Structure formats: structure tokens, C-alpha cells
Image (spheres, helix red, strand yellow):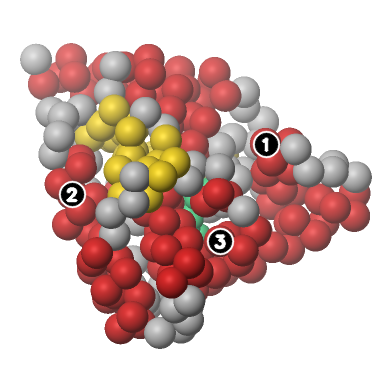
């Protein structure tokens, strides 16, 4: 069983790259951000305050979520697009910073990873969730480039003022993710750093697929 961990800040291209790598290798693709976003959405729908750790822990423990083929089902309902709405994005880092929320989702993520060959994407996969992953990559890109990509992906305006606003939002979320006490967003020392600012998606995917094939060859 081979596990590929892809971590990095918002808008670095993790989802696009991780999905393409999984497709090329015939592995399954797991977006762990979707789990945190699903907890945030369930909290909004149940009127739970994003600072109420105990209440959020029970939301996370009870979470009826299924990740399948890049779609996310919450309580049997397809919420894939809803999870990217601004109200969810606004609170997700606050929700994800609670140690008890993270603990509740940790075993779930490990169980998902045990189901076969996987590409798992998030913030703390190489450092905490799958420290023994066979290939670890930390993807990044300049803040402006990440904001530009995020705007394009979401169909938002790409004029300078809009990009600047988005860049500030992304920087604030990265700061929250990188400075929390438990499992912060970090570049694990054994993860390969790939700055994607000047690379095409195909170039990044090729690099990661090559690294995985090298590991598979070495193991066979
Ligand atoms: O796709 P995007 O980069 O906007 O974010 P995401 O992967 O959907 O993750 C949303 C948020 O969930 C992050 O900003 C983190 O606060 C949290 N998260 C986390 O704490 N740990 C993970 N392994 C994945 C996401």
C-alpha cells in the first residue's frame, strides 16, 4: 500500500495536483480539508458557535460524511459546492484549530488512508496524520499567485483590488493554520518542497508521479 501526502497553504494547487496524481496512478484521492469544512458547515447548520470546542467535538464525532470520487456527502446530501461558500471558509480555520476537533478527525483520516493506495491532501498529513507516508510533498506558491488561482477557480473577479482582497483573506487563514498549537501547517523536514509559482500543473504532477514510481520500483 502506498501513501502520498500533499500539504501546503491555501491556493497552492494541492487539490488540482493531488486529484491528477491520484488519477494518473490509479490511487484514491482524499481531500482532508473537506472534513474540516464539513464540520464547519454542520456547525453553521446546527447553530454551534465556532469557538465552542466541546460542542464542535461532538459535531466532529457524529459527522456523517462520505468522501467519494471528489464529491462530499454530508448526512446523505451532496455538499461539495456548498463547502466552498464564504461562510464556511470564514470559520473553518477557527474550527480546525481546536485540538478536540482534530483528535476526532484523526482516526477517521487514518482509517480512510488504510483503504488502499492513496493521495491524501491537507495541512498536516505528512507531519501528523501519515508520518510514515511513502512520498511527502509540501506545495507552495507566492501569495499573489495563490490568490489569482483561487479567483480563477471560483470564477471571482481578477482585477488588482479583488486579488489583493483575496490575498489578504488567504494570508489570514494561512497565519491561523500555521500558528495554531496542534498540528500547525508546517513544511515537514522530510517533505519535498515544490514552489509551483512558475510551474504548470502537468510539471508538478509529473514530478510527484515520478517520485512515487521510484518508491514503488525500490519496493518491488
Ligand atoms: O482548499 P483550501 O486550500 O482553501 O483549504 P482546504 O484544504 O479546504 O482546508 C480548509 C481549512 O481546513 C484549512 O484552512 C485548515 O484550517 C483546515 N485543515 C486542517 O486544519 N488540516 C487539514 N489536514 C486540512 C485542512
Q: Is ligand 1 less than 8 Å from the beta carbon at label 2?
A: no
Using the rendered view, name the quadrant where residue 137 is placed: top left
Residue in the foreground of this view, choosing between 55 and 127: 55
Residue 146, x across and y down, in percent = 67, 45
Using the rendered view, name the quadrant where residue 201 is placed: top right
Q: Which mark is residue 153?
A: 1
Query: Which residue has dot 3 on it?
Result: 88
Residue 10, x across and y down, in percent = 57, 51
Gap between marks 1 and 3, in whole Å? 17 Å
Gap between marks 1 and 2, in whole Å? 29 Å
Is 92 left, or right, of 186 in this rendering? right
- Mark 1 touches mark 3? (CB < 8 Å): no
Residue 15, placed above or below residue 84: above
Query: Which residue has dot 2 on it?
Result: 110
Measuring 71% from the left and 48% from the top, which residue is drawn there? 147
Query: For the residue carrying disc 1, how many other residues have a C-alpha within 10 Å: few (<14), some (14-19), or many (20+)?
Result: few
Amino acid at each position: 500500500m502506498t501513501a502520498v501526502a500533499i500539504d501546503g497553504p491555501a491556493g497552492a494547487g494541492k487539490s488540482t495536483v493531488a486529484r491528477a496524481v491520484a488519477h494518473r496512478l490509479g490511487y484514491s484521492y482524499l481531500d482532508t480539508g473537506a472534513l474540516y469544512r464539513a464540520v464547519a458547515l454542520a456547525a453553521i447548520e446546527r447553530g454551534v458557535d465556532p469557538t465552542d470546542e466541546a460542542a464542535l467535538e461532538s459535531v466532529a464525532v457524529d459527522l456523517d460524511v462520505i468522501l467519494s470520487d471528489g464529491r462530499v456527502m454530508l448526512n446523505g446530501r451532496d455538499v461539495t459546492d456548498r463547502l466552498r461558500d464564504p461562510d464556511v471558509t470564514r470559520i473553518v480555520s477557527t474550527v480546525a484549530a481546536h485540538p478536540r476537533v482534530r483528535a476526532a478527525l484523526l482516526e477517521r483520516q487514518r482509517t480512510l488512508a488504510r483503504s488502499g493506495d492513496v493521495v491524501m491532501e491537507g495541512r498536516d498529513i505528512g507531519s501528523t496524520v501519515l508520518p510514515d507516508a511513502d512520498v511527502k510533498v509540501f506545495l507552495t506558491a507566492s501569495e499573489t499567485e495563490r490568490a489569482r488561482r483561487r479567483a480563477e477557480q471560483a470564477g471571482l473577479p481578477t482585477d488588482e483590488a479583488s486579488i489583493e482582497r483575496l490575498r489578504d483573506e488567504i494570508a489570514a487563514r494561512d497565519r491561523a493554520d500555521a500558528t495554531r498549537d496542534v498540528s500547525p501547517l508546517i513544511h515537514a523536514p522530510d517533505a519535498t518542497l515544490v514552489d509551483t509559482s512558475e510551474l504548470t500543473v502537468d510539471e508538478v504532477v509529473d514530478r510527484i508521479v515520478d517520485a512515487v514510481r521510484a518508491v514503488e520500483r525500490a519496493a518491488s
